[in-house]
Image (cartoon, rainbow, N blue to C red):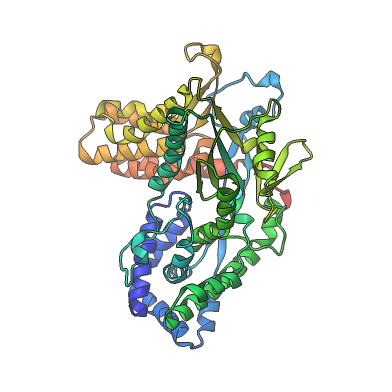
Amino acid sequence: MDSLDLVKTAFKKYKQNIYYEQLDLFQRKKLAEFESEGNLNEKLEKLANIIDSIENGNNCEAELIQLIKKIDYNLIPKNIYTLDNFNKKIANNDELGFLTNKQTSDEYILEGVNYFIDAPIEIHLISVIWVMKAGIFLDSQLCNTCFGFRLNDKIKKPDDKSSHLFKLYHEQYASWRNHAIEKAETVLKIEKKDIAILSLDLKQCFYNIEINFDEIARVLEDEIIDEDEKKLATELTKIIDKIHSAYREKISSHLECTHEQIERTQLVLPIGLVSSGILCNWYLKNLDDLILKELNPEYYGRYVDDFLIVISNPVISEEKKVHNFIEQYFCQKNIFKSKITEKYSFIYQLIENPNLQFKEDKIILHFYAADHSFATLEVFKRKISENSSAFYLLPDDDLQYYINETAYNLLFDGSTNKFRNLTGCVENITELSKNLTNIITGLGQSEIPHEKLTGISDQIFQFYKGKNFINFSRTWEKVFTYTIITKQEKEAAIFYLNIQDTIKNIKLFSGINRDFF
């Protein structure tokens, strides 16, 4: 495959991958501008010339420097709260009984931000080409217990020109979760053994992984036979290293305010760069192998920074069940080490990299005895199955009622029949997104009566108020698509202006140094 074909294939893969992006709309906008502003072939040919120069050992440093100098970042909020919501979160017990449907506030509290790389499309294409030429060898070293950011099998074939890059994320996520539940059921029902299901979540994973690019170069040296291919993969790896350094330098001063625990000299993985997922998996490979070796679990699966582990015949202590479980199965086996915080809770650090941590309050441990009812597991499995099929089987008559029913999950303490047992609700952005898509699809397939359309619109615009504008930002595109299809241009403009007003009212900050602003 010549360099121009390589660049065109990378562009095709990048477009398909970014098609599924719901959060980093800045990158989607940049891609649309790159393709629509004209001279597309000329821009791709220019990048192909750079790739040619890399392959032939010619100097293309000036062109690369110009691209790397344009690297910037965008900030996307993790979550915002109304003052009432935030006060409830940190409240004493006498405020825990308060529940409201009001999502608006004069002021909002921002809790955390994420940095997304803002780079020229050419930088993203270089990242894709790196995946095609070098990343495939790192991905091939991973075991099948790693599910997130796994490369599609087609990309590993010689002269692959398909649009595929990663395996479909929702299928991989479902497989990761479902295999854990199925294995747990088998051990309980067939083998008649007690089980523990442990869920772990690495804190700020991409900000605390520092890649050793020299080690990657050694892997490529060993794995790639063809000398020309080896040279290209190695040089591309050096460029990715430079991209990481430039990005870290760009976010450095602000990162001290928002993620103050990260050392100034420490590199981070750029969120939004396709190579970062491959590098994250490769870095955590040692942890995967260590857990499999030391625990020999019935099931182990990792989806990026989320872990599910099933252990048979576990030892569960009478006190501090979660902490003692982690101590016994992880700390005593030199996988984690525990550390007590100023608030007298525990964090668990990886022995290999203490910056990578699990917080005690984010750890979930389930224990099921084989001689007792495990209805909880069966109900959860059935609920997953219902959620998977609801999107495809939803009848037209239910359309106008489905938004509010799926945007939240209600929390009960006891029977669901008693009003006093309703203690709260949690957002369900996945189900909301699915059903907005279902509504849009339904509108494209049949004509919806005006009364029903009004009912759908009322629910959508009543739901998107205040903090919901920001916390459900992944669904903005779907809402705008809905308003365009239904010719509600005025409502689209109001929706946009309300988002702007909400952003302007974010005036208080939790866990963020005010010097940042």
In-front residue for pair 55/252: 55
Residue 388 in view of the camera: yes
Q: How many marks?
A: 0
Residue 203: % across, % down = 62, 47
Which residue corresponds to the image point at 69% horizontal and 39% vertical from the top-left? Answer: 327
Residue 446: % across, % down = 20, 36
* Quarter of image, res 424: top right
Above or below, comparing residue 5 to residue 351 in the picture? below
Q: Residue furthest front?
A: 191
Q: Is residue 400 left or right of residue 209?
A: left
* Quarter of image, res 379: top left
In-front residue for pair 136/50: 136
Which residue corresponds to the image point at 37% horizontal and 38% vertical from the top-left? Answer: 434
Above or below, comparing residue 253 to residue 168 in the picture? below
Which residue corresponds to the image point at 45% horizontal and 35% vertical from the top-left? Answer: 181
Above or below, comparing residue 321 to residue 15 in the picture? above
Residue 69 in view of the camera: no
In-front residue for pair 8/206: 206
Residue 54: % across, % down = 47, 82
Q: Is residue 494 left or right of residue 326?
A: left
- Quarter of the image with the N terminus is bottom left
Q: Residue furthest right?
A: 342
